[in-house]
Image (tube, rainbow, N blue to C red):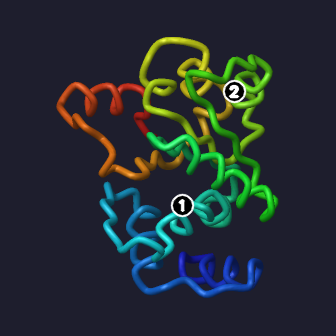
Amino acid sequence: MDVDQCLRMIEDKYDFRFKEKQEESIKAIVQLNDTFITLPTGFGKSIIFFYLTEIFEALAGENSSIVVISTLQALMLDQVQKLEKLSIKSVVVCEIRKDKGVGQKISEGQFSIVFSSPEAAFTTGMWRKSLTSGVFHDRVKAVVIDEAHCITEWGGEFRKEYDRLYELR
């Protein structure tokens, strides 16, 4: 199966049509290119990563996962609710969430998409351990920085930490 077939499969399964820019973005990501996407509010940028795990799975024949890093907790919670309606297993982790059972489920690979605050992903602690170990980490195919305009400092140290934690195979 190629990427175009995967996109048509997703469209049929979820009864919608990708926009041209969404398709271009997904194709770039699937080719493992670093991809920066800037599109208008309401365009459907989240759709680009909502279905990535299914596309990676159809192409590679193995389970996959992605990490979505966002500074907006309310948006992450809203996206998890949307994904639940689509039967796509996802969860939000952030510094105020203390449920160790969720951390274990992440490591075991029970979620396709994990939404994380930057603090949870990049500071030492339970969430970072969950994101960087076990089955989940081994299946990570993409790391998405959502709402990048909210980042106040994007320097070399952030990039080094990102590369160290999420070095993709």
Residue bearing mark 1: 49
| Residue 104 image offset from top left, x and y in percent | 75, 22
Q: Nearer the viewer, mark 1 or mark 2?
A: 1
* Residue 124 against residue 141 in the figure, above or below: above
Relative to 15, 19 lies left or right: left
Q: How many marks?
A: 2
* Residue 128 against residue 44 in the figure, above or below: above
Relative to 18, 78 lies left or right: right
| Residue 54 image offset from top left, x and y in percent | 67, 62
Q: Which mark is residue 39?
A: none
| Residue 33 image offset from top left, x and y in percent | 34, 58
Q: Looking at the image, which residue is at 56% across and 51% down?
A: 75
Within-10-Å neighbours for mark 2: few <14, some 14–19, many 20+? many
Q: Looking at the image, which residue is at 22% across and 34% down?
A: 153
Q: Amino acid at mark 2?
A: Ser
Q: How far is disc 1 from disc 2 in space, using C-alphas?
A: 20 Å
